[in-house]
Image: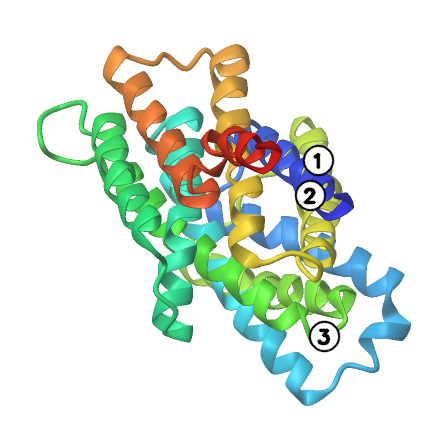
Amino acid sequence: MFADIALFTVALIWGGGFIVMKDTLDDLTPYYMNAVRFSLSFIVLATLFWKRVKKATKQDIINGSIVGIFLCTAFVTQTIGLQYTTASKSAFITGANVVMVPFLVWVISKKHPGYHAMIGAFFTIIGIGLLTLQDGISIGFGDSLTLVCAVLFAAHIYSVGHFAENMDPYVLATIQIGVTAILSIIGALIYEPMPQLSIEVVPQITYMVLIATTAALLIQNIAQKHTPSTHAAIILSLESVFGSIFGVLILGDVFTNSMIIGCAFIFLAIIITETKLSFLFSGKNNLKDEG
């Protein structure tokens, strides 16, 4: 229960993160935003948990680096995509990663995801189509990148669950954030000009560093040590709901009727995939037991 509550909190934090990132992109380019965000977060974590981090083994570093690569590429594609789409659409497309996790488990562990996951994937495709194909059959550049981001976040959730079982979650969180910081710095130096930082972005950066990165990823790594990856994915997918709500209320994002229906399809896919609609039959089972 505590793990579920912790992951719910992470989803709420990340939902608000879509709004903060969208606002900060007016002053910071994607790579530099992630470079600042993850570098400062790494310094905080490494300082707080230095005694644990210095005991990290070679295998710990390898595991953390793998997770860090997924984390970095996911955030880069998400941040760049957010420049070309709304926070609400980005939130819901990113949330589609919950349906992808069971299939990722299938590819790696050879465990069939089940028919509910298949149905969920089908509904997700319909939902993403309704959500993104607003101008004919062509999908927007920002939406495409965000869809790639969803796949990478699915890989990140799976890898965290896989490595957290036999690894100190504090060390895992610190290493993956450090790797993401290094890769973001390299990308910034290669692809983007040096930005001019203003004092106005300090509150946004503070939120992203301390709340959405340091606290949220640390909580996720600890919580996933006590719950399966697919279970964690359904709770974390609520960030799409929170992100969309915040986008409409704070940024004034406008949803068309087809976009609302698309969101409903994706949300339904998430529920079908992760609950297998067991809640519909629980009452019948209870009556049968009583009889």
* Mark number, residue 167: 3
Q: Are marks 1 and 3 in contact (CB under 8 Å)?
A: no
Residue 29, placed above or below residue 265: below
Instruction: Kindly report which numbered mark, 1 or 3, lies closer to the viewer in this rendering.
Output: 3
Q: Is residue 55 above or below residue 50?
A: below
Three-letter code for the amino acid on which mark 3 is drawn: Met
Residue neighbourhood size for the residue with mark 3, other residues' Cα within 10 Å, grouped as few (<14), some (14–19), many (≥20): some
Report the residue that reaches farthest toward the front: 291
Residue 25 appears in the figure: no
Percent x, y of residue 97: 41, 47
User: What SS does tag 3 mark?
Assistant: loop
User: Residue 66 location, x and y as percent?
Assistant: 53, 73
User: Mark 1 Cα within 10 Å, few/some/many (few <14, many 20+)?
Assistant: some
The crowd level at tag 2 (other Cα within 10 Å; few <14, some 14-19, many 20+) is: some
Inter-mark Cα distance, 2 to 3: 20 Å
Indicate the quadrant where residue 63 lies: bottom right
Q: Which residue is mark 1?
A: 207
Looking at the image, which is closer to me, 119 or 97? Answer: 119
Quarter of the picture holding the N terminus: top right
Please report the residue visible at 63 percent of the width from the left and 32 percent of the height from the top.
12
Q: CA distance from mark 1 to mark 3?
A: 28 Å
Q: Return the disc, 1 or 2, that comes first in the chain's sequence.
A: 2
Q: Is residue 26 above or below residue 109?
A: above
Quarter of the picture holding the C terminus? top right
Mark 2 secondary-structure assignment: helix
Residue drawn at the location 69% of the way across and 43% of the way down? 4
Using the image as rendered, state which of residue 13 and residue 251 is in the foreground: 13
| Mark 1 / mark 3, whichever is N-terminal | 3
Numbered label attached to residue 4: 2
Is residue 155 visible in the rendered image? The answer is yes
Question: Image check: 138 left or right of 31?
Answer: left
